[in-house]
Image (spheres, rainbow, N blue to C red):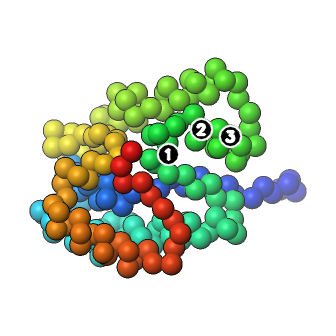
């Protein structure tokens, strides 16, 4: 009331579609709130068609990419966060207009690493009842690597996906790394 209203700032983190599809497939397998995903092949088709929870990956990443032109959106890439987390944390700090000591930034880097978060019950959902998330099927935080899609995609699936991706992302200058 009567105070200065600040614009809503959004930090959006996007990950390459191939690794998202694989990660999402394993999530569907372990999270009992989702229907059984079926085979990898059938799930990949549903993913490409946007017939999964939260809809089309293509639409989501494109809309946020465009929104950053007119709204305070910091668009980050999961792969960049893996490659150089300190640089990406500094981007976040700059975006938020904050400064932290080098020691604090190093502390953040350490505690937000995949390895540390994978062990942390506050981040890894290991305390969720097995009826909701069955970690015996797949851990919520499985591998966290870039390029894991290569363990799932056949050559034919990769070619089909690349063609579909080119069609869906036509006219968009958004670029992802599918391997590091």
Q: Residue at x 24, y 69 (%)?
A: 159
Q: 128 or 144, which lies in front?
A: 144
Contact check, label 3 and label 1, Cβ < 8 Å: no
Q: Do the residues labelled 1 and 2 touch (CB within 8 Å)?
A: yes
The outermost residue toward the left is 39
Front residue of this view, candidates 53 and 13: 13
Residue that numbered label 3 is attached to: 93
Q: Is 158 left or right of 179, judged from the image as shown?
A: left
Q: Can residue 128 be seen in this view?
A: no
To which quarter of the image does residue 21 belong?
Answer: bottom left
Residue located beneath label 2 in the image:
87
According to the image, label 1 marks what residue?
Answer: 80
For mark 1, give the secondary structure.
Answer: helix
Residue 174 lies, in percent from the top left, at: 51, 65
Q: What element carries label 3?
A: helix
- Binning the other alpha carbons within 10 Å of mark 3 as few (below 14), some (14 to 19) or many (20 upward) gives some
């Amino acid at each position: 009331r009567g105070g200065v209203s600040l614009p809503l700032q959004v930090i959006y983190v996007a990950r390459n579609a191939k690794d998202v599809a694989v990660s999402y497939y394993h999530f569907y397998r372990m999270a009992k709130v989702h229907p059984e995903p079926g085979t990898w092949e059938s799930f990949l088709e549903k993913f490409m068609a946007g017939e999964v929870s939260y809809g089309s990956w293509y639409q989501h990443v494109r809309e946020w990419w465009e929104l950053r032109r007119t709204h305070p959106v910091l668009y980050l890439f999961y792969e960049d966060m893996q490659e150089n987390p300190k640089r990406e944390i500094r981007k976040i700090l700059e975006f938020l207009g904050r400064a932290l000591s080098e020691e604090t930034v190093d502390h953040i880097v350490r505690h937000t690493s995949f390895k540390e978060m994978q062990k942390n019950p506050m981040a890894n959902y290991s305390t969720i009842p097995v009826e909701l998330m069955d970690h015996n099927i797949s851990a919520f935080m499985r591998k966290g690597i870039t390029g894991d899609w290569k363990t799932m995609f056949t050559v034919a699936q990769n070619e089909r996906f690349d063609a579909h991706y080119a069609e869906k992302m036509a006219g968009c200058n958004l670029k992802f790394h599918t391997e590091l």
